[in-house]
Image (tube, rainbow, N blue to C red):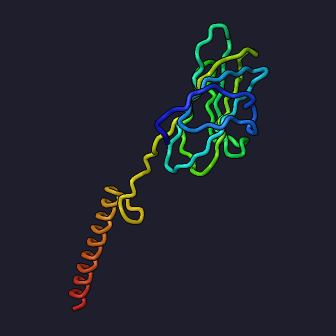
Amino acid sequence: YGTGVAVGADVEDNGTPANAQSITIPFSINGTANSATDTDDYFEFTVTQANLTFDLTLSIPDNPALSTNNHDLFLLDSSGTNQIAQSTNPNSLDESISISLTSDATYFVRVNARETLAQNSTYSLSITSSPSNPPPTGGKSGGGGALGLLALLFLFSATARSEKVRKVRSSVLSSHDK
């Protein structure tokens, strides 16, 4: 993940995965789309670092001139066709996706102008990444931290009780046989 944010405008024609605009994360762009002639804008990025969470946010500014201004956000795999995640809120609500992605892989982002009444509509897309917080391992070979210690103590206690019961039972049986 980086510290600077590349800001720009979408570069046409980026309406298919084959023509996707290549981007570097962190990324922010102001784009235009419409439901008649520029339905989709595609962006392509490669994840090069493990243990990152990616936050994709699509903001739709209020536009009183458009009675319908609805865009959707999709995250696709390296083929550009298989959907990994989506955000499809109704009307002019913002869209967002937060997801951990595999490193050394390429992904596509698709902004879809679902309903703009065939008029140009603007949007802002930002993609950031931050370190994921992997679960603690608690030490050697998948230990469970405090919970694992508690389970170990319980097991030890149960084993000790079983051994004590066995000795008492053996002692009672040997004295009964005499």
- In this view, the residue in front, 126 or 67, is 126
What residue appears at the point 66 percent right and 20 percent down from the top-left corner? 70
What residue appears at the point 62 percent right and 49 percent down from the top-left corner? 105
Q: Is residue 89 above or below residue 77?
A: above
Q: Position of residue 165 (x, y in %)?
A: 26, 75
Quadrant of the rendered image containing residue 89: top right
Q: Is residue 73 above or below residue 2?
A: above
What residue appears at the point 64 percent right and 43 percent down from the top-left corner? 107
Going by the image, does 176 lie left or right of 136?
left
What residue appears at the point 73 percent right and 20 percent down from the top-left corner? 34
Q: Would residue 57 be visible to someone looking at this image?
A: no
Q: Position of residue 149 (x, y in %)?
A: 31, 61
- In this view, the residue in front, 6 or 64, is 6
Q: Would residue 13 be visible to someone looking at this image?
A: yes
Q: Position of residue 67 (x, y in %)?
A: 67, 10
Quadrant of the rendered image containing residue 87: top right
Q: Position of residue 152 (x, y in %)?
A: 32, 64
Going by the image, does 158 lie left or right of 117?
left
- Which residue is at the far top? 65
- In this view, the residue in front, 24 or 52, is 24
Q: Quadrant of the C terminus?
A: bottom left
Going by the image, does 54 lie left or right of 141?
right
Q: How many marks?
A: 0
- In this view, the residue in front, 118 or 48, is 48
Q: Is residue 19 above or below residue 102?
A: above
